[in-house]
Structure formats: structure tokens, C-alpha cells
Amino acid sequence: MNPVKGLQDHRQAVWLDFLSRGFIADGRLKKLVDDDGLRGLTSDPSIFGHAIGQTDEYDDAIKATLQSRDYSAGKIFEKLAVEDIRNATDVLRPVFDTTRGADGFVSIEVPNGAGHFVKMIHNGIEYGLMQAFAEGFDILKNANSEALPHDERFDLNLPDIAETWRRGSVISSWLLDLTASALAADPKLAGFEGVVEDSGEGRWAIMAAIEEAVSADVLSAALYARFRSRRDHTVAEKILSAMRKGFGAHVEPKVEPKERKAKPS
């Protein structure tokens, strides 16, 4: 079997970061789709710019465009790119139909910084999704807590649950696939400390929300959870304990300290 096509058996979809007019016209794209199992394309202005400036594939189209209307360079680029994307999606249509819309797309980063902004928000959403999975599995793990009445406890198999959920449930996703793989390899996740870094996109997404006066409760909470993962008990938590002791004589339970390899953000 073609090794690229074989990746489909492992729920992996191969996309190619390239697009040009000649690549579509001479059948290379169709061959990759039919023979190698290519499932989609990505591109950006630099890829288009190279194809337009370094080949003669677009010369006739540019001349025809200028003869029909006085377009700016930006408008010419937009017109040519849209035509290429439309023709590429025609070639990818069988993939779209076969996968019921899971693949078969052309994704292009738009110029003037908008692509970076969209990617930033994408990663902010990713933070929220990751946090939701993390909290859900934490609840499942603690369903057998000694704090619960004995007849209300459940000893749940997290690897089995993750594997079941990832096979067609409404929350199936690549993130859930990664979670299932991690739990299958290490059900107690003993190889992880739980110190979660952030690469900046989540912060920028929240800053954008503030500038736009948009409520982003879930994304904010997910980012703050990452901050909290890097620290032991904070002054804020100690103040909370002090207030509880003051107004209700609530005494902190004694908990053995846990070593943590914290890193600054």
C-alpha cells in the first residue's frame, strides 16, 4: 500500500502546503489526490507570489485581466488566487464528499496580518478545548474519591472512555485522539508533572478580546489555569484560608507538600 494512503488507517489526513496554476492544470494535484490520498491543500501569499513572479503560468491571465479592467496589483492577486482555489477545490471535491466534509478543502492565509490574527484566535480556542478535556477527565478520575459516599463512587477506566469517545462522539477530535493515546500509554500519566506552559497566542487572544470589549470567559479561564499549574499554593489562597478561619474558625486540612518543578512563564 502507498505509505501516504496508509496514514488514513491511523486517522491521519495528509495536506500539502503548495498551490499553483500549473500544478492543477498538468494533473499533478489530481494524481496526488487519486494515487497518494492527498486530502487537502494550504497556501499563503508568499507561495502564490513565487508562482506568479517566477513562472509564466499566470502571464496570459494577468494580461487578460488588465485588458478587461484596470486592477491594482492586490486585486489581480486576489482574482488569480480565487480562481486557483476554486479549481483546486473542484479536484478535491471527491475527497470532500467521501469524508463528508472533514477534508477536501483549500486553506489560504490572507495578507495584511489577518492570517496571523485568525491563527491567534484559533490557538485561543484550542486552549479552551484542551482545558475542557482536562477538567472532564479530572472529574472522571475523582469519581472514586473517598470523599463520596461509597454507593456513589465509580472506578472508571479512563483509557477505555477516551477510546470510546474518540470514535464518532460529538466531542471527537484530534485533541481527544492525543488524550486517548497518552492514557493508553500511561493510564496514570505518571510521566507528567502537570506544569503547563503557554506560547503567547492565548494571551494575545485575550488581549484582543479586551480591546474589542468581547467577553471571553472560557478562553480566559483556560489561560489562567495554565498560569496556576506552574505555582504551589499562592498568597491569594493563603488569604482565603485566613478569612475562612477568621469568620468561621475553619482550619486548613494538613496536606503533605508535593514537589513541583515549576518554571516561570
Image: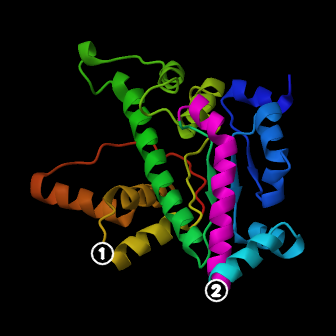
| Type of amino acid at the residue the image marks with label 1 | Ala
Q: What quarter of the picture does the C terminus occupy? A: bottom right
Mark earlier in primary sequence (2, 1): 2
CB-based contact (under 8 Å), mark 2 and mark 1: no
Q: Position of residue 70 (x, y in %)?
A: 63, 87
The label number, if any, that marks residue 72 in the structure image: 2
Q: Position of residue 90 (x, y in %)?
A: 65, 45
Left or right of 118, for residue 9: right
Instruction: Check the image and report above or below for 185 versus 261.
Output: above
Residue 5 within the segment the image draws in magenta: no
Q: Give the labeled residue for mark 1.
A: 213
Q: Say which of 53 and 132 sits in front.
A: 53
Q: Say which of 264 and 126 sits in front.
A: 126
Instruction: Check the image and report above or below for 12 versus 41.
Output: above
The label number, if any, that marks residue 227 in the structure image: none
Q: Read off the magenta span.
A: 71-100
Mark 2 to mark 1 CA distance (whole Å): 35 Å
Where on the picture, by quarter, is residue 143?
A: top left
Q: Say which of 123 and 6 sits in front.
A: 6
Q: What quarter of the picture does the N terminus occupy? A: top right
| Type of amino acid at the residue the image marks with label 2 | Ser
Residue at horizontal 51 percent and vertical 26 percent from the top: 162
Left or right of 221, for residue 91: right
Residue at horizontal 76 percent and vertical 38 percent from the top: 33
Disc 2 element:
loop
